[in-house]
Amino acid sequence: MAADKTATLNLNGSDIDLPVLSPTCGPDVLDIRKLYAQGDVFTYDPGFTSTAACESAITFIDGDKGELLHRGYPIDQLAGKSHYLEVCYLLLYGELPTADQLEEFETTVTRHTMLHEQMQYFFRGFRRDAHPMAVMVGVVGAMAAFYHDSTDITDPWQREVASFRLIAKMPTIAAWAYKYSIGQPFVYPRNDLDYASNFLHMCFAVPAEEYKVDPILARAMDRIFTLHADHEQNASTSTVRLASSSGANPFACIAAGIACLWGPAHGGANQAALETLKEIGSVDRIPEYIERAKDKNDPFRLMGFGHRVYKNFDPRATVMKQSADEVLDLLGIEDNPILQVAKELEKQATADQYFIDRKLFPNVDFYSGIILEAMGFPTSMFTPIFALARTVGWISQWKEQISDPALKIGRPRQLYTGAAKRDYVDIENR
């Protein structure tokens, strides 16, 4: 990208010209790549919150406006009018598919959903009480041992095959991790079901009887997938890009992303939101916990409200709320006190001036946790489902980075505060 203006930094009496890059959306960016060479300094930015580590054309977030765009399309339009596999195509290839392109894409994904039969032994090697995320990290990383024909990142065709395999097989891996954790037999994927329905069938069907997926639940699951498909340069996506910069195979890169997503500050947010609801316990205790959330001296946090990036509202939450209402209406909440708490907490918090003034609205994690709980998933499966949905985003970012001529291996600098150079002291003199 060529710069159309420059900024001048005066350092120790010398001027250093820094190119200013103008993106399609968002604030201008100072190009500091030559800052160290010209000024013998580099920047300090913990968490990289003010640093663009890459150039990307996939996803854009405007936190102040509450805006999320995939290839320019608003997330509410995609979640309302599209479906997950069409969004996958958009993220991967940059444009919405034609009817023929979408049919071919869906057919290809559907026919790659089965796992190599020997991979069953990997699942059975884990303890029964292993967390499903631990299983997913191991199994996805192990795919490189089974699919040698799609690990050469210099071959465009192998990159394409790896992409299809990961998108197609991740629901099977996640569902089998769940089945293994509860001691039930694995359920194989079916080519006559759509992506979301297939996942639900593999999770909840048993050989003893027929299981039919409710279309409302399938649609809700598809929306969860769509709303989590990509989210710009978050921690797990940055991890995938950093692993990719070393030339690692795609399965290793995605396994690294899953491992990062496992962190409670990232992928565990919807689980934390549900655990907050369980801590509240009953509707009559909601006012007490709302007051605790307002008390700056109380360490309690009302999880599921507000967002680090979105300073106004989370655009995904509006769509997710609609799904939550549909699912709760279908399944009923009379016998589930946690879901009763969720509905009443939403009502009281959104009417409270403290939350209104600070724009602390329910976020996507609040509603997705409610939906998954209502569907019958344990909290241990919340993050694996997140990883399943985010896989296409990771792959899209990975493919984009591999094709970037400016690609360099990631090597952040540091602000060193340790001991200065000193001489070794013999042990008898210490």
Image (cartoon, grey):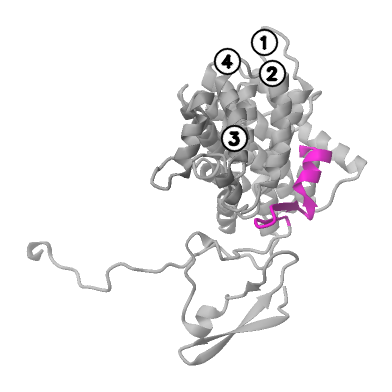
Q: Residue at x 55, y 90 (%)?
A: 15
Q: Position of residue 81 (x, y in %)?
A: 84, 40
Say which label, 4 or 3, has the lower sequence index: 4
| 276 or 255, nearer to the observer | 276
Q: Position of residue 276 (x, y in %)?
A: 50, 33
Say which label, 4 or 1, has the lower sequence index: 4
Dot label at residue 207: 1
Spatial CA distance of label 4 from label 2 is 24 Å
Q: Is residue 377 left or right of residue 213?
A: left
Residue 120 shows in this picture: no
Spatial CA distance of label 3 from label 1 is 44 Å
Residue ID for mark 2:
331
Q: Residue at x 62, y 47 (%)?
A: 250
Residue ID for mark 4:
184
Dot label at residue 108: none
* Residue 60 magenta: yes
Look at label 3 and name its amino acid: Gln
Q: Is residue 292 left or right of residue 71?
A: left
- Please, what secondary structure does the residue beneath circle 3 have? helix
* Residue 62 magenta: yes
> What is the quadrant of the N terminus in the image?
bottom right
Residue ID for mark 3:
348
Spatial CA distance of label 1 from label 2 is 24 Å
Look at label 4 and name its amino acid: Gln
Look at label 1 and name its amino acid: Pro
Query: Over which residues does the magenta segment extend?
Result: 58-84
